[in-house]
Amino acid sequence: MVLLENDSFLTELTRLFQKCRTTGSVAITLKKYDGRTKPVPRKGHPESYEPADNKCLLRASDGKKKISTVVSLKHHVRKIGVGGWDMQIARLANVREHWLVGPILGSMYMNV
Amino acid sequence: MPYYQTWEEFARAAEKLYLTAPMKVRVVLKYRHCDGNLRIKVTDDAVCLQYKTDQAQDVKKIEKLHGKLMRLMVSKESGAMDTD
């Protein structure tokens, strides 16, 4: 699992979407993250970590390649939200409509 | 787990689930361009809420919910706003 900066994560996410145009799926996971980097200690051992309250973890995968990033500021949330996955899907969805129109028109001509 | 039939019901249930258990809930989006569908799942590993669509106009609604949940996760509990 590759942990990236927000901008690199967006670049790699674009690549994942482009790779999965003909086959496969892209999965994006979002989860609240308290910033811990060490595992939770066993019972009886003191928890020496102060949990942070303002981060979330974004992961993306195409089944083979995995990438992730930590988002912690509101303006980063805007960047990821606006420039991120929904734009990729909107662009791909438009391309798919063209793909559907081609065969439908083709079959109409064949019937005539 | 069944898929919700209406977006409004799903969005309401998803936000409610997140607010009851913010540290446990995860949001999963799965897009298949070859099949032309997008699925969203919100779960706390006990309850699982799912919605799927093949309509391009639903992408905007899903994006808004996703952004809203991300903003909730990133905002501090004290309610202090980050100055951008």
Image (tube, rainbow, N blue to C red):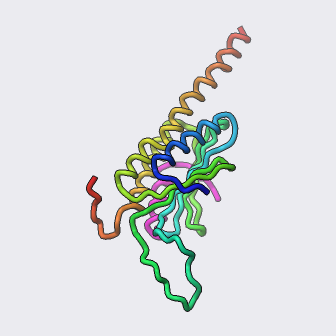
Q: Position of residue A29 (x, y in %)?
A: 55, 55
Report if residue B15 lies within the magenta region: yes
Residue A18 showing in the rendered view: yes
Numbered disc total: 0
Residue B13 showing in the rendered view: no
A43 or B49: which is nearer to us?
A43
A53 or A4: which is nearer to us?
A4
Q: Quadrant of the N terminus of chain B?
A: bottom right
Q: Residue furthest top?
A: A112
**What span is in magenta?**
B1-22
- Principal secondary structure, stretch drawn in magenta: helix
Q: Position of residue A111 (x, y in %)?
A: 73, 11
B78 or B48: which is nearer to us?
B78
A103 relative to B5 in the view: left or right: right
Q: Position of residue B50 (x, y in %)?
A: 58, 54
Residue drawn at x 49%, y 41% as measured from the top left: A86
Residue drawn at x 52%, y 69% as measured from the top left: B24
Report if residue A105 lies within the magenta region: no
Residue drawn at x 52%, y 70% as measured from the top left: A37
Q: Is residue A64 above or below residue A107?
A: below
B69 relative to B30 in the view: left or right: left
Q: Position of residue B43 (x, y in %)?
A: 56, 62
Residue drawn at x 57%, y 75% as measured from the top left: A39
Q: Residue furthest bottom?
A: A44
Q: Is residue B11 above or below residue B78?
A: above
